[in-house]
Image (cartoon, helix red, strand yellow):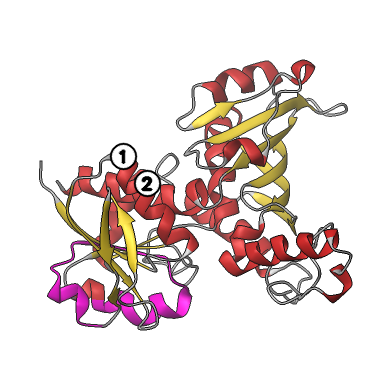
Amino acid sequence: MKKYNVAVVGANGAVGEEVLRVLEEIDFPLAKLTPLASARSAGKKVEFNGKELTILELTHEVFDENSIEIAIFSAGGSVSAEFAPAAVKAGAVVIDNTSHFRMQENVPLVVPEVNPEDIAKWRETGIIANPNCSTIQMVQTLKPLDDAYDLVRVDVATYQATSGAGKSAMEELVNQMQAFFSFTLDKAEVKAFNQQIALNVIPQIDVFMENGYTKEEMKMVNETTKIMHKEIALSATCVRVPVLRGHSESLTLTFDSEVSANEAREILSKAPNIVLVDDPSKALYPMPKDCVDQNETFVGRIREDVYANNMLHMFVVADNLRVGAATNAVRIAQKWVEMEG
């Protein structure tokens, strides 16, 4: 089997660290791994497969100098905008975790369990985009149910962990909770979010648009259409909650035909990378604490609507740093290797 030279851009960030761990766990066909980051982080070490690797500075030339064939970017949209074209020019396929390329018409936006065939379009730009974290776990759940019942509308409320905003946001939650226990919460720094996150929920993720929805909410709307190749009416309310890892979503799904909760459970239990956790009588349902470091999406609380026979409600949870970012990126790389190898 052919082995590949892989670069991870933003290797010491929250998502970059998870990419390294996932690559390690699945025994990816690696010839060489090159961790990359800004000049500020160059020279620092990251651990991989029991060895210490030195982070190299991200430059326009580094991809060519290291014969990179697959470049996984997780360092922010502006970094991808500047350096992804250099990686492509050097002959690498870019798998980009940021929002920068997602809605470009000729860039495939891929969740391998949903639309793996779109990977084949990578040659047009050399880039494959990784969707938003909250979109990924949702469409993994929607796809098998859409195939069975023909989905016409989705209403979703998200409960998104602080790690979705990076390491500094996680630290802010911890610092504020420490301040609470020392009776100084009113003096704790509020920087990563525009409101205190400890002991609070914030019904805003990203900036508000003219239509009253936030950018994060509109990402879910637009990305779902692109990934599923179908115009599905979708309304999202995205909420930041005081959780470190694991995004939760409450889904209300409307179909074009009558649905059964028991059938839906059966369908989802057989769906790829979905784990059914649905026994409320034993207090078994998906929760963020149970999904940390897991590569699957957990689904439960599946129930029929009280009034309409074509509606289902359910609760979906996944590790946003893994399923919502690193794991999906590595699965794209695996599929790309399958197709190109």
Q: Residue 332's x, y, as percent?
A: 34, 49
Residues drawn in magenta:
60-86
- Magenta run includes residue 121: no
The CA distance from mark 1 to mark 2 is 6 Å
Specify whether residue 219 is in view.
Answer: no
Residue 9 lies, with reference to residue 141, above or below; the image says below
Circle 2 packing at 10 Å, graded few (<14), some (14-19), many (20+), is: many
Residue 236 lies, with reference to residue 40, above or below; the image says above
The residue that label 1 is drawn on is 26
Q: Residue 224's x, y, as percent?
A: 56, 52
Q: Residue 318's x, y, as percent?
A: 58, 42
> At x 42% / y 48%, what residue is drawn?
328
223 displayed left or right of 109:
right
Circle 1 packing at 10 Å, graded few (<14), some (14-19), many (20+), is: few
For the residue pair 189 and 165, the one nearer the viewer reads as: 189
> At x 43% / y 53%, what residue is drawn?
18
> At x 29% / y 53%, what residue is drawn?
48
Q: Amino acid at mark 2?
A: Val
Q: Residue 267's x, y, as percent?
A: 55, 22
232 displayed left or right of 41:
right
The residue that label 2 is drawn on is 22
Query: Residue 108 occupies which quadrant of the picture?
Result: bottom left
Query: Residue 90 occupies which quadrant of the picture?
Result: bottom left
Query: Residue 96 occupies which quadrant of the picture?
Result: bottom left
- Magenta run includes residue 71: yes
Q: Amino acid at mark 1?
A: Ile
